[in-house]
Each structure stands twice: as structure tokens, then as C-alpha cells.
Image (tube, rainbow, N blue to C red):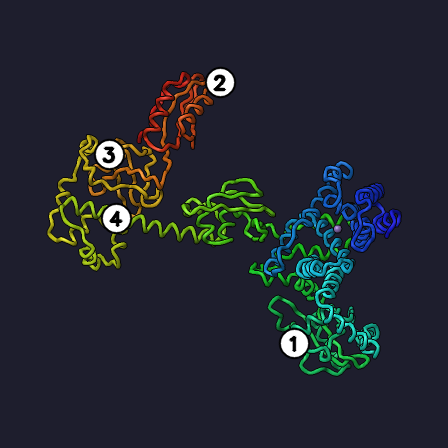
Amino acid sequence: MMRQYQLVELVRGYDPGADEDALNRAYVFSMKAHGSQQRASGDSYFSHPVEVAGILSDKKLDTASIVTGLLHDTVEDTIATLEDIEELFGPEISRLVDGVTKLSRLELQGDESRQAENFRKLLLAMSEDIRVLLVKLADRLHNMRTLGYIEDDEKRRAIARETMDIYAPLAERIGIRDWKEELEGLAFAELNPDARASIVNRLEFLRERGVVVVGRVLDELRQTLADEGLEAEVSGREKTPYSIWRKMQRQNIVFEQLSDIMAFRVVVDSVEDCYRALGIIHGRYRVIPGRFKDYISIAKPNGYRSLHTGVMGPENQRIEVQIRNREMHEIAELGVAAHWQYKQETRPTEGTEYRWLRELLEILEHTAGPEEFLEHTKLEMFIDQVFCFSPKGDLYALPQGATPVDFAYAVHTDIGNTCVAAKINGRLMPLRTRLRNGNQVEISTSKAQTPSPTWESFVVTGKARACIRRFVRSQEAEQYANLGREIVEKTFRRNAYELTRKAILGVLKKFGLGSPDELYAAVGSARLTGRDVLAAVYPGVKDKERQQKVVSIAEARQGKGETDHAVPITGLIPGMAVHFASCCHPLPGDRIVGIVSTGKGVTIHTIDCDALESFADMPEQWLDVSWEADPRYPRMHVARIHVILANEPGSLGTLSTVIGRDGGNISNLKITNRSEDFFEMQIDIEVADIKQLTNIIAALRATSVINAVERARG
Ligand code: MN
């Protein structure tokens, strides 16, 4: 295990400005905190954070990262708290340690790869500071190096699976190829030891026979190109057992046929030089037929460009050579890194999606100092998405701004349609709350619930919106049909005709409609009137009502309306076929009248509403309606009152107390006038019916700070 002074020297070696004191204190703090804890290997637990710090120092990371590496398990596994860390090491370190701790607490449920994709994104999104992710990856790398000490087979495999699915791609994603390959290699050894062993053996055999000779081939390739005066960077390597295995899987070939155990890459300055290099190589070595691919003239769909060829190279070995210029090289590196993005439904928009990654790679490769590296690497990638969990731990990726209703629909349409409440991280929150990364969302449902048209104003997912619309539309049609049927029935009854299904079926054609429901819906939405239907069934009928119905407003107000013919508005959902007028705010118990207008359904006014004057000469629009209590749908209605209130301390409090005592809920409050002595206010109160409002008004009138109360009219 690395000693304290060794670690400090190592860090100071690449970062002379490193905070030696912090490193020393973290080393000691972690050692004391972990005390006599042991690893599965029998080593002291403390050796683990020290190794993690060492892995991080290989990448020349800053003091804060190394310190975080030393402390990363103290909060989770010892009695040390985040507060201790903050007090001793300051807010930056405590934030980083907290970040790593949170990542460690996230566990992938099951090994479904469907979730692996989202999980990777979650990790990225939650590592607001890339150093959190780097520490997490170093942690995983050391755990993988010591995986063999874990005795439980299943646990070992689960960790390896997770490494393969989640952490290796993440390491690749942020451009740390050697971590990626090591993670993959270690996971492969655990998950498929037989396949790996046979590949390793075969490689060993080939090496012994002098077949795998990367160094010698490399030298000769460089010399060959230089002889022709071409400037090129040539690199080469033996492929890893895992990548060989992947290739065998992908191409369904056996090991003996695999020709590119060694891969070489030639990077030149221009496109012309690419073809020149190809010419030189093909001129010098024998080409293996069928292996040449020109991805420069025809790029791969993901933008990858290069020349690929296979030749019998130096030492008479089959080798694969990729030739590209610097620009293509960069895109290729990013293309690989961005590859899993392409498989997602997220469209790759030109350049923008992995711009940060490009910058990150550049910084990693050309970094002058750790500060510069860290300054530039905030993870901004997935700000357009939030990731939330169900209580079971299933992960859902939703667009930014998504609400519990979106979440509910994402889980299942039925859950969305019946959701009544949401708990976010255990707390009851409004359905319109914007969800945040890592939220756990629990949806309560009720069979009595139906999607509310108001949900449409705050949901952001297409699925939620479509479901709500579909429901609202079907409800609307049903509401209009119900209302229309009532109207037609009343019209027939008033004129002493019997309404039969046969009669209705007989006139459908005349109106160009397909079903009785369509006909009723047409009446309900006022595209047809009840009298239109009556006249169609009994041509020549003199509509008694026509003469009779020309009632004056005065008459109506005197109560001469035929209430037994009134259409009950029971069960109609406000906002669809029925609207309550905002001028007079009718309440159950008020005498009301409906005004029918095309496409809007019925607007309910109180019989004394001033707005009715403008419909005085349009009797065909008047509809006799009545309240009918329906205990299945207890519904609150908004009443509006005007209040004049003394302008003195506590008067507003008194006012709301009085209203609340009678069960009224203030939904809106507007001060319309304010003087030294008085407030004039308009208050909207949710009440069940006229009786409740009357009680509230009476109570208000009895209150000393209130000078006047009136119900708002028209
Ligand atoms: Mn750890």
C-alpha cells in the first residue's frame, strides 16, 4: 500500500502547487475512519481508498479529486458524516464526496440492458462535476482489480455485469480509453472465463510462433512510409481479448480466421495523403482480397471516415491498417464515444450533442494543468432530461419539465388516466410539480379519477398529452350527446310527441349523420336544435313552443319557466358541454338559465344576470336548465363576492377566518380599491351551493371589520 509521503510526492510530482496539507489530513482521516475494517482480500479497508487515490493520480488530477478518492467511502461505510468532512475539508470536498456517495447508493435493479442505457445517463446527469464520475470510475476500477476476492459467485458476476454495461461505456464516453479497456477486460474474465482463456492461449501461441509482433511491424511500416517521403503518425497494438471476442461474435467467425489481431493506424495530414499512404502500402505489401473499404468517399452513416485495408504486412503477417487524416481521426474517436447515442432515439444534432465531449478529449490530451482541465468539464450533456425512479426502483427518463402526470403516463396509460396524487421522495406534492433528477415518484390512483383537461396545460410528454386529449375528446362527445338527448326529449315532450329510436333512425339520413349519438351530439353542441329534429320527424308540425317560448326576460325572472321541462345539468363536466358564466358565477340552488351557442355547448347564467339582456331577442338560444344534486360528483363551484373591509391590522385575517369557518375556500382575491380607511375587494370562494354562500355572507355581515358584502352580479 502506498505510504502517505509517497502519495504526496506523486501528486506534487505533476502538480507542484498541490495542497500537501489537505492530502495529509485526508490520508490520516480516512485511515482513522476505516480503522480496522477489512476488505474481502483480508487487506485493511484503508488500502482501497489509497489505491483509488493512486489511480486518480495516474490521470494527474487535482488535489480535490485525490482527497475525494481518499475519503470516498467514509460517509457510506464509517461513522464519519458529511458535516465532519465539510468542517475539516471545506464545501468543495464535501460536495464531491457527497456526489460519489450518492452515485454509490444508486443500484441498477436487475441486469436489463434496457435500463443500462438510462442508468449511464443518470450517472452522467447526477455527476454534476466530472470529478465525481472520475472518482466513481477509479473506485470501480480498483474494485474490479480485486474482484476475485469476493467469494459469492453471484455477487461477483453482478458486479462484473454492471461494470460491462455501465462503467466501461462511461469510461469510454468520457474518453479514458485505458480505464475502459481494463474495466472491460476484467469484467470479461469474470463473465466469460472460458472464452477469454482460449483467446489468451491462442494469442500466447501466436506470439511464441512470432506471429504477433507489433513492435517490429510498426518499425517497418514507419520506415516504409518515410522512405516514400510521407509524413505520418503510425501506431499499432495487439487487440485485447475482449475486442477479439467481440469481433468473433459480430462476424460469427472462428479465431483461426481472425486476421486482425494486430491493428495499425496511420494518421496523415490530408485526404490526398490518405490515398498516397494506401498506395504505398498496397505497393509494398500483398493485398488481402475483399478487405479494402473506402469510407472516405462513402462515409459510414455515423459520419465515420477512414480507409481500411488488410495486407500481408511486414514479417508476412496479416494486419489491418486504418488510414485517415487528423480531422477524420478526431471524428472517429468521438464517433466511437458517441456511438451509443446514435442507438438512442435522441437524434444526433450536428455537432452540438457531443461538443462538450470533444472539448473534454482535447483537454484530457493537451492539458497544461489540472485546473484548466477541471474548469472546462462541467457535465452539461443531459440538461434536457430528468431521470426518476418508481418505488420499485425502475428508472424512467423524461424530458426536462416533466411532472408526476407525465411520469404516471410513462409507467402505464391506465396509471396516468387514474392518477390522483403523487409522492415525491415520500412527500405529497401537487401533480403539476416539475420533477428533478433522482426523484422517487409514487403515484396514487383512484378508479373515480379521470384525466383532467387542466393537466394538458402542464404535461410535457407527447404520450400524456395524447392520452388526455383523447379522453377529453371522447368525454366531450359523450357530454354533448347526453345534453343533446335531454334537449330533444324535452322538445318532443313539450309538444306532446313521443320520441322513439325508430323516429330518430329515420331522420339520420336527412341530417347526413351516422348514428343517434351523432345526432344528439349535434344538438348538444347547438349545431342543430331540438326543434330541427322535431320538424324532421314530423314535417308540418307547428312548434307550439316556437310561439310559447318567446318568453320575456321579465317573465322568466318571475319564475314562469317550465321547470319540469328543464334539462338537468347533472354529471356534465364543466369546461366541456357546460360552462358556468364568469359574470354571475351560478351556484347550485340559484335559479339558472342556459344559453346555447354553437360549438361551445351551454353557458349557465343566474336568471338575474345582466348579461342575459343581450340574448333577449334570441329565444332559440335559451335552454331551461335545472340543478340536480348528484352525490356521485360532489363538485365545488366558484362564487364571487365584493367586500368592503376596514383598513386596519388583522382585518384581512379576520375576513379569511370567517370565510374558512363556514367551509369556504378562497381561490382568488383582488383588491379593487384601497383608501386610508377601507379596502374594496373581490373575493372568489369555492363553495358547494348557494346555501353555503348565504351562510358565509351572513357571517361576514356580522363581522365588525366588514362594512359591506355583496354577491357579484354580471
Ligand atoms: Mn470504494
Q: Secondary structure at mark 3?
A: helix
Q: Nearer the viewer, residue 530 or 109?
A: 109
Look at the numbered disc 2 and give the secondary structure of its residue. loop
Circle nearer the viewer, 3 or 2: 2
Depth check, mark 4 against mark 2: the one in front is: 4
Mark 3 or 2 closer to N-term?
Answer: 3
Residue 464 lies, in percent from the top left, at 47, 51
Q: Give residue 347's quadrant in the image.
A: bottom right
The residue singled out by tag 2 in the image is 649
- How far apart are the two marked residues, 1 and 3, measured between alpha carbons? 84 Å
Q: Which residue is mark 1?
A: 252
* Label whose residue precedes the other's in the sequence (1 or 3): 1
Amino acid type shown at disc 4 = Gly
**Mark 1 in CB contact with mark 2 (< 8 angstroms):** no
Q: Where is residue 206 drawn, in percent x and y? A: 80, 77
Instruction: Confirm whether residue 368 shows in the render.
Output: no
| Above or below, 632 relative to 417 | above
CA–CA distance between discs 4 and 2? Answer: 54 Å
* Residue at which label 3 appears: 613
Between disc 1 and disc 3, the foreground one is 1
Residue at image mark 4: 484
Q: Secondary structure at mark 4?
A: helix
Amino acid at dot 3: Glu
Sequence order check, earlier mark of 4 and 2? 4
